[in-house]
Amino acid sequence: MRVAIAGAGLAGLACAKYLTDAGYTPIVLERRDVLGGKVAAWQDEDGDWYETGLHIFFGAYPNILQLFKELDIEDRLQWKEHTMIFNQPEVPGTYSRFDFPDIPAPWNGIVAILRNNDMLTWPEKIKFGLGLIPAMIQGQNYVEQMDRYSFSEWLKLQNVPPRVEKEVFIAMSKALNFIDPDEISSTVILTALNRFLQEKNGSKMAFLDGSPTERLCQPIVDYITERGGEVRLNAPVKEFLLDEDGKVRGFLMRGLDGQPDEVLTADLYVSAMPVDPLKVMLPEPWRQLDYFKQLDGLEGVPVINLHLWFDRKLTDIDHLLFSRSPLLSVYADMSNTCKAYANPDRSMLELVLAPAKDWISKSDSEIVEATLAELEQLFPQHFSGDDRAKLLKYHVVKTPRSVYKATPGRQQHRPSQTTPITNFFLTGDYTMQRYLASMEGAVLSGKLTAQAIANSNRPSVTNTQPIGVGS
Ligand SMILES: Cc1cc2nc3c(=O)[nH]c(=O)nc-3n(C[C@H](O)[C@H](O)[C@H](O)COP(=O)(O)OP(=O)(O)OC[C@H]3O[C@@H](n4cnc5c(N)ncnc54)[C@H](O)[C@@H]3O)c2cc1C
């Protein structure tokens, strides 16, 4: 059976990979000339890579780790020391660390928190620990119920001192969803904390050894095409064409460079597009259905990813850093963290600017100027005096609508992978799965969609593999 999939982000590619395993023939249609969607990357005229986002893989990502294993590319994940490193705004240029010892969970996390005395006082740690007890005892059910509160509200309800939010959770919520704790749903932070506390290596981080497009997406494409599937770039789906029953009869493909539009038909159809363009493309009869109406509650959040090349080494830290600065979220010196971007003499900082709503429409030079001002706090030794670090070049990648904005109440708007239209399925990080809007969420959603298809439509082949979901 042929399955047409609109979108070659991680969800669309994972869906195609698992459909291939189950004996289907996927045809992935990607609007742009690059694979990966929100993990897409480009090479500039000097051969330097720049990316849509600084991407971190966590130990708590079972499905994406399984995918690396199945593609035999596990060695491309560069695991870092088990620690979380925060800048200290009150002492510019210094760091505070949460070091996880090599003991079972949750003790490694508890020891990491207790040993850090720079950011939280003992009474603050104890009050925060007490506040977390319901989440630890009642687990995911409780975490889901807390979707009605922002994380700021939840902290107040649990009597956690406001300094805990300021010191730790502004940085964490900006890293997880590019917004502040007064906007983010408690479910997002509690889900992450639960994974980090329940799994020994849950918060351990890895960087890919090169660009996600080449080092992760391409092997998935090779896997699919070697087994008879197809992945087409520059193939925008313009419209979902319906038959008289309201089912999909084809994807209308926009003709590029003066070519006429064409109809692509398949046995089954999947949208792996982000939720914002999907909403625009919904055919009129579907808009009346509650299942599709619920999507109105989801909308992508803006974010900006910057790459700054300097004339010297700014740091030798080989890890992700939480900037704790007003404009920036996380950052890393990619010349240390990523094999393909390595440079022993010069730094390339990749930085996430969030919340980005007031910056997304500003010019690249304004954004870079404001970022450099923040770097004076992060690297005072290199941005003061006569011998200041020189910016050699930069790239700014803006994503006006990235992952769905996870404000309180969003969980009820996330759709299942199965739709009321029997030959049409959804996949994507915003669809309902337990890993939020992330690479793990995207891969898991792709797998769940392939599973839903396999459960509802058996292809007429015998050598198929079951699709197992990691928890
Ligand atoms: C700055 C940034 C940093 C991030 N950091 C992390 C991180 O550290 N860790 C983590 O786990 N996650 C991170 N994420 C989130 C992660 O990138 C996403 O959750 C994930 O990649 C989403 O995958 P997806 O396949 O669901 O959607 P997308 O990647 O958005 O894929 C959708 C695809 O559909 C295509 N498309 C759209 N319309 C059409 C059409 N009409 N026809 C055909 N194709 C179409 C798009 O071009 C795109 O390729 C980050 C995201 C950003 C933006």
Image: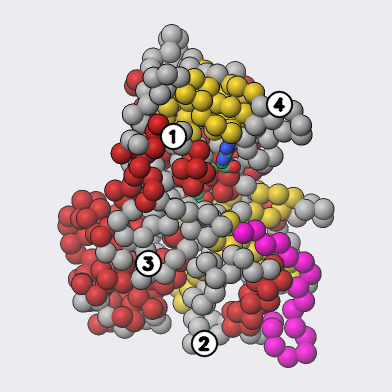
Q: Nearer the viewer, mark 1 or mark 4?
A: 1
User: Which comes sooner in the sequence, label 3 or label 1?
Assistant: 3
In the image, taking residue 237 as reference, residue 114 lies left or right, namely left
Could you tell which of marks 1 and 4 lies nearer the N-terminus?
A: 4
Query: At 77% across and 76% down in the image, what residue appears?
Result: 390
Residue range (magenta): 382-398
Which disc, if any, is residue 99? Answer: none
Secondary structure at numbered mark 1: helix
Residue 319, position as x, y percentages in the image: 55, 64
Q: Position of residue 320 (x, y in %)?
A: 54, 64
| Front residue (pair 407, 88) | 407
What residue is disc 3 on? 183
Image quadrant assignment for residue 372: bottom right
Residue located at (35% from left, 36% from top): 288
Q: Residues within 10 Å of mark 2 (few under 14, many from 20)?
A: few
What type is the residue that disc 4 sits on? Pro
Distance Cα–Cα, label 1 vs label 4: 24 Å
- Cβ of mark 4 under 8 Å from ligand 1: the answer is no
**Image mark for residue 91:** 2
Q: Disc 1 designates what residue?
A: 284
Of the numbered discs 1 and 2, the one sitting upstream in the chain is 2
Tell me residue 343's x, y (percent): 73, 61
Query: Could you tell me how far apart the alpha carbons at marks 1 and 2 are, in whole angstroms?
Result: 57 Å
Q: Is mark 2 within 8 Å of ligand 1?
A: no
Mark positioned earlier in the residue sequence (2 or 4) = 2
Disc 3 or disc 4, which is closer to the eye? 4
Residue where numbered disc 4 is placed: 260
Where is residue 209 shown, x and y percent of the image?
A: 63, 50
Sequence-first disc among 3 and 4 = 3
Q: Amino acid at mark 3?
A: Glu
Above or below residue 187? Residue 236 is: above
The C terminus appears in which quarter of the rendering? top left
